[in-house]
Image (tube, rainbow, N blue to C red):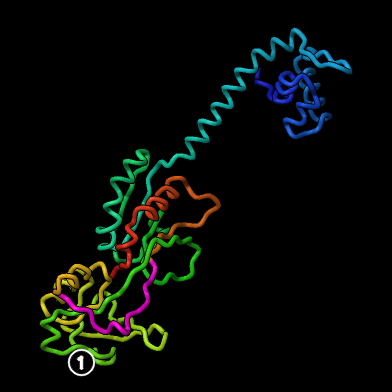
Amino acid sequence: MAPHWEGLNEFLSVAEHGSFTQAANKLDTTVVSVSRRVAALEAYLGVKLFHRTTRKVSLTDEGELYYQRCRPLIAALVDAEQTITQAQSLPAGQIRVTAPVNFGEQYIAPLLAPFMVAYPQVAVDLHLTNRRVDMTDTGTDVAIRIGHLPDSSLKAKRLGSRQLTICASPGYLALNGRPESPSTLSHHSCLVGSNEHWHYQSGGKVRTLTVSGRLRCNSGVALLNAAKHGLGLAQLPHYYVQSALVSGELEEVLTDYRVDDEGIWALYPSGRQLQPKIAAWLAYLAEHLPAQQLRTGVY
């Protein structure tokens, strides 16, 4: 015999409150609806569950027996529902994350261990690449992106900002002079990364300039090393060159043409409800990425 649930909540509520009116208020329904459902349950069971008078509602012997048997079953059902709901609200499962190589190595990777200790049910797959991967095709949950974001259906959370710096070694500048404006870069050897168009600001607008030189490489670390050795000018994010600027190995040039800081973003798919594991990761990034060091970017 299959269990019959219809009218059970109404029966239990009337039994606990001793009133159809109070039961209806508790269940946010009408007295008529409660009465009908209890009557249908009585008809199904073939017994009267309540003594009804104009002044009082009380359980029959059968009603008392049914109530005592049903109450622990409903309590167990409520407990089971709460257990499942809480389990779904806890961060768990794998998060697939992509980030630019150098930025990922310096800032994202160090956060993985403490994050995974804090959330032991979460696994992380971190893929470092300077290529903008398609999040849908790769199943990526969160992508760290730098700079201007194209219009898309993705949601974005700002984590910080970056600053691009044009710099060279003191030795290079002593031999070749300091560029006084972006137009004079054509007379210099420029160290070209994955993008041969350098950005600068003039007249309140961000402009681009095509540069060239003896070395082209898609590694910011390699360009930094070449700049230190006097091979030319490099435009690199601040986090590549900060220590070299402090030590005097490099000097910044064209500071009057420096572009405004650009955003560092965490992109994630849009949806009605953010999964707990994704929400936890985004909150952890926002809290623990060192804000004082995030005047950075990726080349």
Residue 152 vs residue 282, the one in the foreground:
282
Tell me if 76 is positioned left or right of 298 in this view.
right
Residue under the point 16% across and 90% down? 177
Measured as percent of width and height from the top left, residue 29 is found at 77, 34
Please state which amino acid type lies under the numbered disc 1: His
Decide whether residue 87 is among the magenta residues.
Answer: no
Residue under the point 59% across and 22% down? 75
Residue that sits furthest to the top in the current view: 61
Tell me if 90 is positioned left or right of 172 in this view.
right
Tell me if 81 is positioned left or right of 279 in this view.
right
Specify the segment rendered in magenta.
Answer: 249-263
Question: How crowded is the residue under tag 1: few (<14 C-alpha within 10 Å), some, or many (20+)?
Answer: few
The correct choice, above or below, for 143 with respect to 258 in the image is above
Using the rendered image of the protein, determine whether residue 203 is visible from the camera's viewpoint. yes
Residue under the point 62% across and 22% down? 74
Helix, strand or loop at label 1? It is helix
Using the rendered image of the protein, determine whether residue 140 is visible from the camera's viewpoint. no
Measured as percent of width and height from the top left, residue 99 is found at 32, 60
Which residue was labeled with disc 1?
A: 187
